[in-house]
Structure formats: C-alpha cells, structure tokens
Image (cartoon, rainbow, N blue to C red):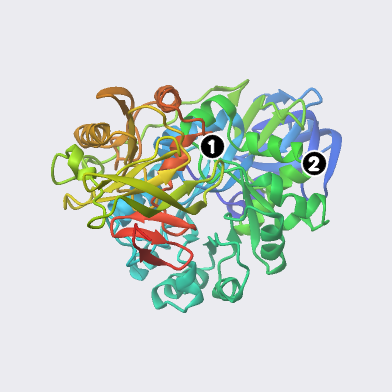
C-alpha cells in the first residue's frame, strides 16, 4: 500500500521538523543506529508524519501535540527495518500476503522478490498475480521480472515462457524494481540476444539487473558475464567468490536460507582480507515457512553474520542501507533519516537482535513478536489451481531403469547432494543389474530419482540415481516444488512408493509428500501452482515439520532435506541435474548419458 512520495510530503515534513505542525507519532529517547555514519547515538527522538520521517534529533518535543502518539524507546536501539535483497516467496510455500504476515514480527519491512517459480508454471500472468498481492501489503515488497523462463532453453521445458516483450511490459508495473536473477550465465557470456535484450530493457528503464553465477571458475566466462550487466550475485560460496564479485563492481549477496549457509565463508573477505563491507548485502534466497515461524527471517541472517565476526552495525548496514542503495531506493528506505519511510525496529540488544517493536510506513505493525494489524488475504484466481497434469496414473514399472543388453553391472552417473549448499557433485558409482534392470545401492546410499513431466500431460518420466539423502527403508518423497521448471521430482528406495507418492500429488493438485511401504506419512498440500498453500504460515510450518520428520524417519539426516530435494532439477547450478530432457551436465551445459 503506497504512501505519498517524499516530494509530495516535503512541505508537511518541513513543517513538522520546524515545529509548525505536530507529528503523527514520535519515538522518544532511543539509541539511533545510524547506518550512514556507522554510529550509535544515544538519547535521540524520531518524529514521523504521513508515514515518513520528518525529524531525528535530541528533542522532538516541539513536534508533539495532543494527537501525537508517543512511543517510549526507553534506551532501546532504533534500527532501520530490515530488507531481504533476494528471495523467492514461493519457497516459503505460502502466498505473498501470508509471507508478509509471517515475517513482519521478525522485523522485515522490505523484500525484493523474484517470482520465477510461479513464472515457470503460469508465465507472466502468474507473476502479475503475485505483483498485485505485493502491492496491497503494509510493507515494501518490490518485484523483479523473472529473466530466465525456462532457465536453460534446450535443457528443460517449463510450463511457460517469459519473452523480452514480456519483460518490457512488466517493467511498466508499479512494484517492479528490476530483472530477476539472470541464471543463463553462458547465454550472457556468449551474447545470447534474448538474455542481452532483457538486460538492455531493464537498464534502459533505470532498474537493477539481478545476477546468478554459480560456477567456481572465475575465467573469461565470468568476465563476459559481468560485462553483460548483472549487478549482484547470491551464488557465491567461498571467500574468493565474494572478493572477485566485489572487485568487479558486483555486490556479493551472502545468503542464509533454510538450507543455504553461505555467509560464514564469504564474510571472511571482510573479516580477514579487509574489504569494504559497503559492497556486501545479506539475503535469504530460500526460506521455508518452518524456518520463518520458528527461527526468524532477516533478523536470523543478521544475527548469524554478527556471530561470524562482523560488527553489529556493519551487519545491519548489509541488511538495510546497502540493499537500498543497490536498488536505487536509499532515498526511500534503508535508514532512519528525514524523508525516508518510517520503517523502524526497536530492540534492546544488537548482537542477539530481539525484535520488540516493528513499525512500517509510520504504523506499528508488531510488538513482542505479535502481529497487531490485519493483513489482507489475496484471492488467487482459479487458473492458479489444478496445475499438475501428469497425463496418466503412474505404476512402479514407470521407474524401471533398463541396463545395456547383457550387462550384469553398470557404471552410472549419480547426482551427489551437498548438505547446506545448492551445488551438487557429479559422482560415478558401479551398480548391480538384476533381470535386466539396474538396481539401487542401499549400503552405498544410492537411490533412484525421477522427474515426472507435469505441465503438458505427456506422461514422461526421466529416471536416474542420487546419493546423499541416507534413506534406509522402503520410501519415496515427491515434490512439485522443483526449481526452476517445477516438474515433479520423486526420490525413493521403493519404486512402488515412488508411484504412490507421485499419484497422490497428482490427486491433491501438488505439494510435497512422503510415502513408506504404501502408507502416506506426511503431505504439504500446495494448491496454488503446485508451489504455495492458501493456509496460514503456522499451519504450513506444522505440516512441513511433519514432512521433515517423516523424511528423517526414513533415514534422512540432511538439514532441511526438502530444500535439497527441490533443487535436483535446477539445471543452472553445477555439477549435475535431472530435467525432462534427461541428465544434464551443468559444467558443460549439455545432456549426458546415465551410463558411462
């Protein structure tokens, strides 16, 4: 819900600052966390009018009238509202409005969202639904136009496509802040006309181009990618990744999501090598509802960054002013200074960052972790539902993997899961053959993975092998959350359970489910595009917890294994993935045979 611009409110703000007009509200006697100067200044007042800050100084009594609401800070820190610089709402498995409701009590007042998950299912009309949902929120939710739909043309087929003309159209919408992560990094480096056309349209509109460069090689392709225009990157995992990006004028976005723990290594570029922290940004990328409800959102990321050795105010800068400047919004958000939106947190301690009061656009939205306002629930249109179209009911033999004629064992390519990171390993394993069918290796932690086409009803199933989940009993996990094309990914040790899990998701319209020995152990139903629930975050979090517990009961020990599961089809992050056209070597951007 937009408020008047600074220019529109300037006469009113000047009058309040001068005492000619009374403030709507005043926060009194707090420690001012000044992210512009890196200072913490005690005993300061903040006067607010029309949703924006009019005055910050030692005494705002001249702006307090009979109708002014006075909030006593009582010496607590006044911190700018936190910004999530890069994230996907769909990964929370809830709608934009429900996501806002969940994160506001944790101090998040600005989010920069890339809805490329729903774009891969429903195209630009799906993006518009989420854009309109975002526009109705009491916090600042900016939307990036998804750039790569499908993410890797020729290596996967999504449910929709985003064109250069689509990008140009979306750039005219009011909540659009730029282009979503440019995942087709080889396309940019090789001069692909579509990729460069999307970047050009965004830059011509004066907006920010999001980056995505996941390979560790910092060779000519990296330099070509940077030259193409992406302004940030959240795919770094090492100190040298952060250094390389910062030196080239890109902003390293260090993420702490539900399953991605990339802050600790990259922050060493600052704590060990002394790089200027003003080029660095914090984000979540992917947080599921359980993490948000139980552990927090950007407050969790800031706490973690401080624990890695950053000064508290430096970590706060990375989640406020640095983000605002990156998106060209520092005249609107990111600091507690005149003219900016009155997005303010009160906290009694910076390192542990308890969120005791949250104000956005001058209104107190939450106090002591309790939401104080009603968040309007979006009504998503019917075309967002019933999007799982498998074409047929699956049987166990749809997951058979036939060996080469006469073979009694095979050497197979296996996707290797890396805990708490998005990349995978390209493994090789020798697997036995029985009655012409390649078998799994339970003792060697090799089970089957299958991608079930779910957009066009082709009935297609692509089979392969995966290692790292640790499943040690007959089971299967199926999910229609499968970045980025969001077909259905099924992982299991039992082909009967794999078929049962897949068919169950087809019946309920999408989601994540765990089956073992023919029984449903847990399901998170995601009726909207097979990605999001219409239920409350707490309910979805409870179901997600049961789902994680069911995976653990089947032997899985990975942290947030469902997030690792959801990326097994992401054909833009090395080293090896599965798609609807086969097994993909992402280091070479080509399909490869299952058997060596």
Measuring from the top left, give residue 220's x and y in whole percent. Answer: 59, 76
The residue drawn where x is 38% and y is 52% is 484
- Quarter-of-image position of residue 31: top right
Q: Which residue is mark 2?
A: 309
- The image quadrant where one finds the C terminus is bottom left
Disc 2 residue crowd, few under 14, some 14–19, many 20+, Cα 10 Å? some
Q: Which mark is residue 301?
A: none
Measuring from the top left, give residue 430's x and y in whole percent. Answer: 41, 50
Mark 1 / mark 2, whichever is N-terminal: 1
In the rendered structure, are the residues bearing label 1 and label 2 in contact, judged by CB atoms less than 8 Å apart?
no
Q: Is residue 182 left or right of residue 282?
A: left
Disc 1 and disc 2: Cα gap in Å? Answer: 21 Å
Q: Nearer the viewer, residue 355 or 23?
A: 355
Q: Which residue is mark 1?
A: 258
The residue drawn where x is 19% and y is 33% is 507
Judged from the image, the secondary structure of the residue bearing numbered disc 2 is loop
The residue drawn where x is 16% and y is 53% is 458
Judged from the image, the secondary structure of the residue bearing numbered disc 1 is loop
Q: Is residue 277 above or below residue 303?
A: below
Measuring from the top left, give residue 170's x and y in whole percent. Answer: 39, 61
- Quarter-of-image position of residue 242: bottom right
Measuring from the top left, give residue 107's x and y in whole percent. Answer: 61, 33
């Amino acid at each position: 819900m937009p408020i008047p611009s600074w220019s529109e409110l300037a006469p009113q703000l000047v009058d309040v600052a001068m005492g000619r007009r009374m403030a709507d509200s005043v926060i009194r006697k707090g420690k001012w966390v000044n992210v512009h100067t890196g200072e913490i200044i005690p005993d300061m007042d903040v006067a607010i009018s029309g949703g924006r800050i009019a005055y910050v100084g030692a005494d705002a009594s001249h702006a307090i009238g009979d109708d002014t609401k006075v909030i006593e800070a009582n010496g607590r820190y006044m911190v700018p509202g936190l910004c999530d610089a890069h994230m996907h709402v769909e990964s929370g498995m809830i709608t934009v409005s429900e996501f806002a409701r969940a994160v506001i009590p944790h101090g998040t007042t600005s989010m920069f969202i890339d809805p490329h998950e729903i774009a891969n299912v429903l195209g630009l009309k799906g993006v518009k639904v989420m854009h309109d949902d975002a526009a109705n929120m009491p916090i600042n939710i900016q939307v990036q136009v998804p750039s790569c739909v499908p993410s890797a043309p020729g290596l996967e087929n999504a449910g929709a496509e985003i064109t250069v003309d689509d990008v140009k159209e979306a750039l005219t919408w009011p909540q659009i802040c730029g282009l979503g992560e440019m995942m087709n990094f080889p396309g940019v480096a090789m001069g692909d006309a579509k990729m460069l056309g999307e970047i050009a349209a965004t830059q011509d509109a004066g907006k920010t181009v999001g980056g995505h460069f996941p390979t560790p090689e910092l060779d000519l392709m990296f330099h070509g990618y940077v030259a193409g225009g992406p302004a940030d990157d959240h795919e770094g995992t090492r100190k040298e990744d952060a250094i390389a990006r910062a030196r080239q004028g890109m902003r390293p976005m260090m993420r702490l999501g539900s399953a991605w723990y990339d802050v600790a290594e990259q922050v060493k570029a600052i704590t060990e090598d002394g790089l200027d922290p003003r080029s660095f940004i914090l984000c979540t990328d992917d947080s599921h509802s359980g993490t948000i409800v139980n552990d927090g959102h950007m407050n969790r990321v800031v706490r973690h960054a401080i624990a890695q050795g950053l000064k508290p105010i430096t970590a706060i800068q990375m989640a406020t002013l640095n983000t605002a400047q990156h998106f060209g919004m520092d005249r609107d958000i990111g600091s507690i200074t005149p003219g900016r939106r009155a997005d303010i947190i009160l906290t009694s301690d910076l390192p542990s960052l308890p969120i005791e009061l949250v104000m956005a656009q001058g209104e107190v939205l939450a106090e002591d972790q309790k939401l104080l306002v009603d968040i309007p629930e979006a009504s998503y249109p019917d075309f967002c539902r019933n999007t799982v179209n498998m074409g047929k009911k699956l049987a166990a033999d749809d997951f058979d993997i036939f060996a080469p004629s006469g073979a009694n064992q095979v050497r197979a390519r296996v996707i290797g899961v890396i805990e708490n990171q998005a990349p995978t390993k390209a493994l090789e394993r020798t697997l036995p053959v029985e009655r012409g069918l390649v078998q799994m290796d339970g003792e060697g932690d090799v089970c089957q993975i299958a991608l079930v086409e779910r957009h066009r009803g082709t009935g297609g199933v692509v089979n392969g092998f995966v290692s790292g989940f640790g499943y040690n009993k007959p089971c299967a996990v199926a999910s229609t959350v499968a970045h980025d094309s969001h077909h259905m990914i099924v992982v299991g040790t039992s082909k009967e359970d794999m078929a049962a899990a897949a068919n169950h998701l087809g019946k309920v319209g999408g989601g994540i489910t765990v089956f073992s020995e023919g029984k449903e152990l847990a399901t998170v139903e995601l009726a909207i595009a097979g990605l999001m629930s219409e239920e409350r975050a707490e309910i979805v979090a409870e179901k997600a917890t049961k789902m994680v517990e069911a995976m653990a009961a089947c032997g899985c020990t990975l942290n947030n294994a469902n997030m690792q599961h959801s990326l097994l089809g992401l054909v833009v992050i090395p080293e090896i993935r599965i798609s609807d056209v086969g097994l993909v070597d992402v280091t070479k951007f080509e399909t490869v045979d299952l058997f060596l």
